């Protein structure tokens, strides 16, 4: 048996409260962005809007400059799975647009993503978005009572498989620990694996972020070094929240209500700080 040292940053309740402040900035930026995702909107204007909301709150966009990333948000349209760079793309009615956004406030990082259909979209596109959103919340619900981090991915995968057996869950990208940096240990897979993952402990904060595609999960990176697309051209959706596990349960730091509404539907009572 291989013993592996777990290097997971555990936060105190006061530190989680500081992360909540960061999470609410990210939530506010995403709420503003959602309103702006209308036909004719230009991606770089959406990026500027997110950046201004984040800076007005006294925070900084943590994506900007990360590994040389050139924008404040990722904006991933249709067959783009993640890490699309907002530039001159013009949104059209029916597009499936995921927006990934993060902030750092007082040294504490938050990270969240939503996927929306621009105007009226085809039924299969709406279904993909909703199945992915539910998979995120099923993963968050699993985190509330999980003994091991691996239970989150098992719940995400089961959620998608049950809702839409023909959809695929992306395996090449996943969630992560978050805190004094955006990407920290542990990895948070979106599928069941033999490894059960590290033990879940009070003070653990994770970014849970399922990416789901209509068909084949094969994806490739564009020559820009960032944009990840499905190889078969199928649509992709991505939802993400930054979630704290405390001694009392979970609290979703990037959700206005801490996740109360969605988790209540799953029989989980949230644990405000
Ligand atoms: N939520 C994204 C992730 O965890 C954040 C990407 S930041 C970027 O992969 F700078 F790399 F775009
Ligand atoms: Co993330």
Image (cartoon, rainbow, N blue to C red):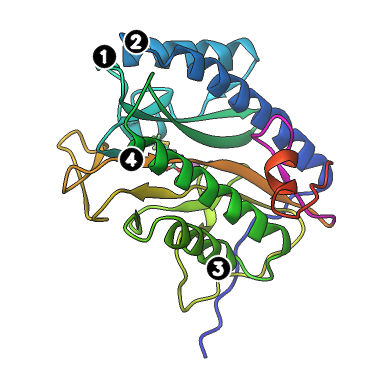
Q: On the image, numbered disc 2 is attached to which residue? A: 41
Q: Residue 133, percent across and down?
A: 51, 43
Residue holding disc 3: 150
Point out the tag, 4 or 1, that comes first from the N-terminus: 1
Instruction: Kindly indicate whether the residue at mark 1 contacts the one at mark 2 (C-beta within 8 angstroms).
Output: yes
Residue 272: image location, x then y, percent? 83, 41
**Separation of residues labelled 2 and 1 (CA atoms):** 6 Å
For mark 4, give the secondary structure: helix
**Label at residue 90:** 1
Residue extent of the magenta highlight: 248-259
Q: Which mark is on residue 124?
A: 4
Whether residue 237 is visible: yes
Whole-percent x and y of residue 230? 22, 46
Q: Which mark is residue 185?
A: none
Q: Are marks 3 and 2 in contact (CB under 8 Å)?
A: no
Give the overall secondary structure of the magenta segment. Answer: loop
Residue 194 placement (x, y as % from top left): 46, 79
Front of the two marks 4 and 2: 4
Q: Secondary structure at mark 3?
A: helix
Q: Is residue 113 magenta?
A: no
Closer-to-camera residue (157/202): 157
Instruction: Looking at the image, tell me whether mark 2 or mark 1 is earlier in sequence order.
Output: 2
Q: Nearer the viewer, mark 4 or mark 1?
A: 4
Above or below, 91 relative to 95 = above
Residue at the image point whose x is 54% and y is 23% from the top: 30
Say few, some or many: other residues with alpha carbon within 10 Å of mark 2 (under 14 / 14 to 19 / 20 or more).
some
Q: Which of 14 and 166 lies nearest the eye of the viewer?
A: 166
- In the rendered view, would you say 131 is above or below 42? below
């Amino acid at each position: 048996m291989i013993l592996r040292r777990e290097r997971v940053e555990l936060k105190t309740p006061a530190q989680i409260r500081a992360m909540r402040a960061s999470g609410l900035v990210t939530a506010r930026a995403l709420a503003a962005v959602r309103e702006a995702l209308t036909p004719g909107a230009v991606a770089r204007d959406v990026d500027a809007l997110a950046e201004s909301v984040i800076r007005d709150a006294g925070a900084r966009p943590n994506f900007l400059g990360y590994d040389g990333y050139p924008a404040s948000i990722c904006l991933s349209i249709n067959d783009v799975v993640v890490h699309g760079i907002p530039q001159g793309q013009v949104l059209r009615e029916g597009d499936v647009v995921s927006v990934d956004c993060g902030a750092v406030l007082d040294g504490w990082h938050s990270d969240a993503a939503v996927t929306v259909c621009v105007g009226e979209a085809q039924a299969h596109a709406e279904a993909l978005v909703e199945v992915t959103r539910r998979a995120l919340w099923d993963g968050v619900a699993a985190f509330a009572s999980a003994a091991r981090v691996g239970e989150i991915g098992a719940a995400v995968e089961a959620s998608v498989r049950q809702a839409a057996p023909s959809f695929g869950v992306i395996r090449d990208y996943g969630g992560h620990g978050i805190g004094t940096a955006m990407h920290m240990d542990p990895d948070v897979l979106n599928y069941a694996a033999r490894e059960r993952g590290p033990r879940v402990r009070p003070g653990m904060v994770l970014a849970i972020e399922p990416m789901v595609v209509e068909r084949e999960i094969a994806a490739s990176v564009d020559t820009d070094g960032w944009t990840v697309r499905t190889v078969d051209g199928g649509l992709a959706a991505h939802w993400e929240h930054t979630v704290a596990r405390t001694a009392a349960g979970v609290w979703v730091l990037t959700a206005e209500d801490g996740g109360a509404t969605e988790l209540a539907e799953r029989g989980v009572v949230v644990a405000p700080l």
